[in-house]
Amino acid sequence: MDLAGEILISAMLVIGGAFGLVGSYGLVKLPDQMTRLHAPTKAATLGVGGIMIASLLWFGFFGERASWHEFLIVLFLFLTAPITGLMIAKTNMHLTWRPDELPYPGEDMHWATFGDSADRSLMDGDADLDNTERDLRE
Protein backbone atom coordinates (compact mmCIF):
# COMPACT_ATOMS: atom_id res chain seq x y z
CA MET A 1 0.00 0.00 0.00
CA ASP A 2 2.90 2.34 0.69
CA LEU A 3 4.30 1.88 -2.82
CA ALA A 4 0.92 2.57 -4.44
CA GLY A 5 0.52 5.70 -2.32
CA GLU A 6 4.00 6.92 -3.21
CA ILE A 7 3.37 6.34 -6.93
CA LEU A 8 0.01 8.15 -6.79
CA ILE A 9 1.47 11.11 -4.87
CA SER A 10 4.47 11.30 -7.22
CA ALA A 11 2.19 11.22 -10.26
CA MET A 12 0.06 14.07 -8.86
CA LEU A 13 3.19 16.12 -8.14
CA VAL A 14 4.53 15.60 -11.67
CA ILE A 15 1.15 16.37 -13.27
CA GLY A 16 0.68 19.45 -11.08
CA GLY A 17 4.21 20.64 -11.84
CA ALA A 18 3.71 20.16 -15.58
CA PHE A 19 0.48 22.15 -15.55
CA GLY A 20 2.12 24.86 -13.45
CA LEU A 21 5.03 25.08 -15.88
CA VAL A 22 2.73 25.33 -18.91
CA GLY A 23 0.61 27.98 -17.16
CA SER A 24 3.66 30.04 -16.21
CA TYR A 25 5.10 29.81 -19.72
CA GLY A 26 1.74 30.85 -21.22
CA LEU A 27 1.44 33.81 -18.89
CA VAL A 28 4.81 35.12 -20.06
CA LYS A 29 4.75 34.20 -23.76
CA LEU A 30 1.19 34.60 -25.03
CA PRO A 31 0.74 37.75 -27.15
CA ASP A 32 -2.18 39.72 -25.72
CA GLN A 33 -4.25 40.10 -22.56
CA MET A 34 -7.19 37.94 -23.57
CA THR A 35 -5.09 34.94 -24.61
CA ARG A 36 -2.71 35.44 -21.69
CA LEU A 37 -5.68 35.21 -19.35
CA HIS A 38 -6.17 31.51 -20.14
CA ALA A 39 -2.81 30.47 -18.70
CA PRO A 40 -3.46 31.27 -15.02
CA THR A 41 -7.17 30.44 -15.09
CA LYS A 42 -6.75 27.04 -16.71
CA ALA A 43 -3.29 25.51 -16.56
CA ALA A 44 -1.92 27.12 -13.41
CA THR A 45 -5.15 26.36 -11.52
CA LEU A 46 -4.83 22.69 -12.44
CA GLY A 47 -1.16 22.78 -11.45
CA VAL A 48 -1.83 24.15 -7.98
CA GLY A 49 -4.79 21.80 -7.65
CA GLY A 50 -2.66 18.77 -8.52
CA ILE A 51 0.00 19.69 -5.98
CA MET A 52 -2.59 20.32 -3.27
CA ILE A 53 -4.25 16.98 -4.01
CA ALA A 54 -0.81 15.32 -3.72
CA SER A 55 -0.42 16.98 -0.31
CA LEU A 56 -3.88 15.75 0.70
CA LEU A 57 -2.95 12.22 -0.37
CA TRP A 58 0.37 12.35 1.51
CA PHE A 59 -1.35 13.28 4.75
CA GLY A 60 -3.92 10.54 4.12
CA PHE A 61 -1.31 7.81 3.47
CA PHE A 62 1.67 8.81 5.61
CA GLY A 63 0.62 11.56 8.02
CA GLU A 64 -0.81 11.16 11.48
CA ARG A 65 -4.26 12.08 10.27
CA ALA A 66 -5.88 13.30 7.07
CA SER A 67 -5.92 17.07 6.62
CA TRP A 68 -8.89 18.57 4.81
CA HIS A 69 -7.34 22.02 4.51
CA GLU A 70 -5.89 21.11 1.11
CA PHE A 71 -9.27 19.90 -0.12
CA LEU A 72 -10.90 23.17 0.89
CA ILE A 73 -8.13 25.18 -0.81
CA VAL A 74 -8.57 23.19 -4.05
CA LEU A 75 -12.35 23.60 -3.89
CA PHE A 76 -12.05 27.36 -3.32
CA LEU A 77 -9.47 27.67 -6.10
CA PHE A 78 -11.54 25.75 -8.64
CA LEU A 79 -14.64 27.81 -7.80
CA THR A 80 -13.04 31.25 -7.83
CA ALA A 81 -10.47 31.07 -10.67
CA PRO A 82 -13.02 30.82 -13.54
CA ILE A 83 -15.11 33.62 -12.07
CA THR A 84 -12.05 35.82 -11.66
CA GLY A 85 -11.02 35.10 -15.25
CA LEU A 86 -14.50 36.02 -16.47
CA MET A 87 -14.46 39.32 -14.60
CA ILE A 88 -10.99 40.21 -15.91
CA ALA A 89 -12.08 39.36 -19.49
CA LYS A 90 -15.23 41.47 -19.20
CA THR A 91 -13.24 44.38 -17.82
CA ASN A 92 -10.79 44.08 -20.70
CA MET A 93 -13.68 44.03 -23.19
CA HIS A 94 -15.23 47.07 -21.59
CA LEU A 95 -12.03 49.12 -21.43
CA THR A 96 -10.33 48.27 -24.71
CA TRP A 97 -12.95 47.14 -27.25
CA ARG A 98 -15.72 49.06 -28.98
CA PRO A 99 -19.07 47.31 -29.47
CA ASP A 100 -18.69 47.28 -33.25
CA GLU A 101 -15.44 45.28 -32.91
CA LEU A 102 -17.24 42.37 -31.23
CA PRO A 103 -18.78 39.52 -33.23
CA TYR A 104 -22.55 39.57 -33.61
CA PRO A 105 -24.03 37.46 -30.76
CA GLY A 106 -27.35 36.68 -32.46
CA GLU A 107 -30.93 37.90 -32.32
CA ASP A 108 -32.38 38.80 -28.91
CA MET A 109 -28.90 38.48 -27.39
CA HIS A 110 -26.19 40.98 -26.50
CA TRP A 111 -22.83 41.10 -24.88
CA ALA A 112 -23.30 41.55 -21.14
CA THR A 113 -20.63 44.23 -20.98
CA PHE A 114 -22.31 46.21 -23.76
CA GLY A 115 -25.91 45.61 -22.80
CA ASP A 116 -27.82 48.82 -23.48
CA SER A 117 -29.91 49.40 -26.59
CA ALA A 118 -27.44 51.83 -28.18
CA ASP A 119 -24.74 49.21 -28.25
CA ARG A 120 -27.08 46.56 -29.67
CA SER A 121 -28.22 48.88 -32.44
CA LEU A 122 -24.60 49.71 -33.17
CA MET A 123 -23.81 46.00 -33.52
CA ASP A 124 -26.88 45.54 -35.75
CA GLY A 125 -25.60 48.33 -38.01
CA ASP A 126 -28.78 50.37 -37.58
CA ALA A 127 -28.34 53.75 -39.26
CA ASP A 128 -31.68 55.14 -38.08
CA LEU A 129 -30.99 55.99 -34.45
CA ASP A 130 -32.99 58.55 -32.56
CA ASN A 131 -31.26 61.40 -30.72
CA THR A 132 -31.11 59.64 -27.35
CA GLU A 133 -29.40 56.60 -28.80
CA ARG A 134 -26.94 58.79 -30.70
CA ASP A 135 -26.05 60.60 -27.47
CA LEU A 136 -25.53 57.28 -25.68
CA ARG A 137 -23.30 56.01 -28.45
CA GLU A 138 -21.03 59.05 -28.30
Image (cartoon, rainbow, N blue to C red):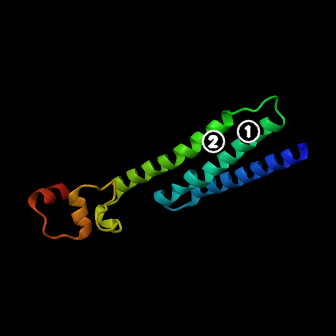
Q: Residue under label 1, please give it.
A: 56
> Is residue 100 visible in this depiction of the protein?
yes
Name the one closer to the observer, 67 or 21. 67
- Distance between the alpha carbons at the discs numbered 1 and 2: 10 Å
Q: Residue under label 2, please give it.
A: 74
| Quarter of the view holding residue 62 | top right
| SS for dot 2 | helix
Q: Residues within 10 Å of mark 2 (few under 14, many from 20)?
A: many
**Residue 136 rendering spot, x and y as whole percentages:** 18, 55
The residue at 66%/51% (across/down) is 20
Q: Is residue 54 left or right of residue 31?
A: right
Q: Earlier in the sequence, mark 1 or mark 2?
A: 1
The reply to whether the C-beta atoms of the residues labelled 1 and 2 are less than 8 Å apart is yes
Q: Quadrant of the N terminus?
A: top right
Give the vertical position of 12 relative to 62 (above or below). Answer: below
Q: Is residue 23 left or right of residue 82?
A: right
Residue type, numbered disc 1 = Leu
The residue at 16%/70% (across/down) is 127
| Quarter of the view holding residue 107 | bottom left
Give the vertical position of 34 relative to 1 (above or below). Answer: below
> Number of marks in the image?
2
